[in-house]
Amino acid sequence: MSKVTVVGAGNVGATVANVLAHRDIVKEIVLLDIQGNMAKGKALDTWQQAPIDYYSTYLRGTDNYAETAGSDIVVITAGVPASRA
């Protein structure tokens, strides 16, 4: 598999990207969120673990749907946040 997109960089999306990266079964993961800087930060956090945890998956975060082109799989974790009482 070459490329996976995870839509939604919240807790679930970031965890999905992290687990996928650690399994080292895909070349690239695109973490997409409407808050592009958050997606970039979470992708960078996971990508910087690669030399320590011995995986080669490249991660990038974005808010641009064009960067998801060519994805083999798209995982959608985005949704309306639960309200807090």
Image (cartoon, rainbow, N blue to C red):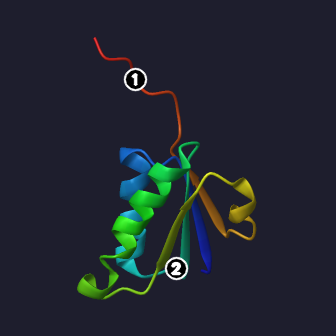
Q: Is residue 19 visible?
A: no
- Image point 34% across, 76% down: which residue? 48
Q: Is residue 83 visible?
A: yes
Q: Farthest residue toward the front? A: 37
**Quadrant in which the N terminus appears:** bottom right
- For the residue marked with disc 2, what is the amino acid? Val
Where is residue 33 shown, x and y percent of the image?
56, 47
Taking the image as shown, residue 74 lies to the left or right of residue 53, namely: right
Q: Say if 76 sits above or below 85 in the image.
A: below
Badge 2: residue crowd in 10 Å (few <14, some 14–19, many ≥20): some
- For the residue marked with disc 1, what is the amino acid? Ala
- Image point 42% across, 87% down: which residue? 56
Q: How many marks?
A: 2
- Image point 75% across, 66% down: which residue? 69
Residue under numbered circle 1 = 82
The disc placed on residue 26 is 2
Where is residue 79 shown, x and y percent of the image?
53, 33
